[in-house]
Image: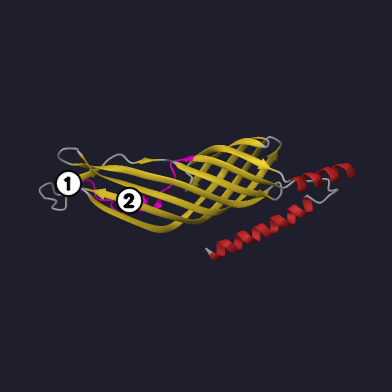
Amino acid sequence: MKRVTVFILFLVFIGFIQAQRRTAPGSRNTFTAYNDIRIGIGYKPFEAAYAIENFSLFEMDPWFENPNLIDFNAKDYYKGARYTTNALFCEYIYQANKWFGLGGTFTYFSYFNSYYDTMTDATVGFNSVHHFSIYPTVRFTWLNLRGFSMYSSFGIGQRLVLQSDELRYVHNNSGRIGIAGQFTLLGLTIGKNTYCFSDLSTLGTQGIITVGVGYRLVSTKNLRHEKQADYTR
């Protein structure tokens, strides 16, 4: 994590230097830095612990097993369908220049399912897992037009996982810290100050596809500099 933090700080420094060059009054390629705020929802966020659990519980196919053996560890309940809230997230990016932006992302999602009795199919319990994640995010915009942009982004950080489990009136609560993050190969925005966005080729804590709305806020100080540069030219 320390190496990742140092790398991100290095990128921030490079982006800041580039922003100073491009936003200097009188420059022909003047770019007005802005604050980018967005909220969205992502489909099927990645739950690493559950995927690892499924892999660790992998067993041989039934035709390899002896049908005459009795499984004394058989459970008297089974898990029902597993549902999710999908990923709800908000993101802040400081767009220092046309190609580089840095900020942070907060994401929440949960998965939940019921337990059922194997004989009667009656509900005998409930399980829910809540994920809270926060991590720095770097965005590289490789097509930046007025009203349309395409970008790639990457973020990695920490997640807090809180689990609540109830089975036949026995309650169990637990928590753990894990790694969170998102890698987006292709994302796009449509709109100017207020816009719609979608990450189409992406994977991680925010899901395998995201949609949402955003707002670009330009400071009045930057606007005054831009107008002075236009007047000078």
Q: Is residue 52 magenta?
A: yes
Residue depicted at x 70% and y 58%: 14
In-front residue for pair 136/168: 168
Q: Which residues are magenta?
A: 42-64
Distance from the alpha carbon under mark 2 to that under mark 1: 20 Å
**Residue at point 14%, 40% (across, down):** 119
Please provide percent x and percent y for residue 39. 55, 41
Q: Quadrant of residue 142?
A: top right
Type of the residue with mark 1:
Asp
Q: Work out whether 168 lies above or below 14.
A: above
Q: Quadrant of residue 192?
A: top right
Given contact means CB atoms under 8 Å apart, are the residues at marks 2 and 1 in contact? no
Q: Residue at x 72, y 47 (%)?
A: 33
What residue sits right under mark 2 in the picture?
164
Asked if residue 59 lies left or right of residue 213, the reply is left
Q: Is residue 225 left or right of residue 114?
A: right
Which residue matches tag 1? 76
Spot the residue most to the bottom. Answer: 2
Residue 176 higher or lower than 108, as above or below = below
Q: Position of residue 45 (x, y in %)?
A: 44, 45
Mark toward the start of the polypeptide (2 vs 1): 1
The magenta stretch spans residue 21: no
